[in-house]
Image (tube, rainbow, N blue to C red):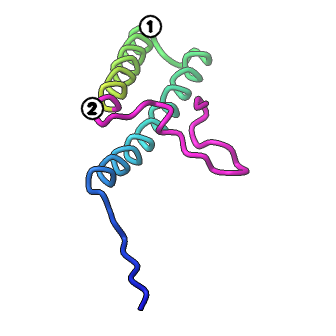
Amino acid sequence: MNDTRLDIDPQQAGRDLAALVLTVVELLRQLMERQALRRVDLGDLSDGQEEAIGTTLMLLDQRMDELCAQHGLRREDLNLDLGPLGTLLPDGP
């Protein structure tokens, strides 16, 4: 009889789920930042819009740091290695 048990640590599972969710949020944050920079470069935005976007992106970046710290994660922990494709997050290590 083969007694194979799967021991799942609820705390580790919760941390892994938080890392996955924060990875998706970080990917979206980076994509939004790139899109905003592209629009700034094209001159599509007014000065007020540029300032509002800059402030929003800065606050979102700070909030990401807070959420990572709250869950015992670093930004580097959020970057998934996709093997031959490289890493998921363009700004990753």
Q: Secondary structure at mark 1?
A: helix
First in sequence, mark 2 or 1: give its number.
1
Number of residues whose C-alpha sits closer than 10 Å to that of mark 1, classed few (under 14), some (14–19) or many (20 or more): few
The magenta-colored residue range is 68-93
Number of residues whose C-alpha sits closer than 10 Å to that of mark 2, classed few (under 14), some (14–19) or many (20 or more): few
Please state which amino acid type lies under the numbered disc 2: Gln
For image coordinates 55% across by 16% down, the residue present is 40
Q: Is residue 11 above or below residue 39?
A: below
For image coordinates 39% across by 9% down, the residue present is 48
Q: Position of residue 68 (x, y in %)?
A: 35, 32
Asked if the stretch drawn in magenta spans residue 50, the answer is: no
For image coordinates 32% across by 62% down, the residue present is 8
Label disc, if present, on residue 77 of the rendered structure: none
Q: Which residue is mark 1?
A: 47
Quarter of the image for the N terminus: give it: bottom left
Q: Which residue is mark 2?
A: 70
Q: In this orientation, which residue lies closer to the viewer: 81 or 58?
A: 81
For image coordinates 53% across by 39% down, the residue present is 79
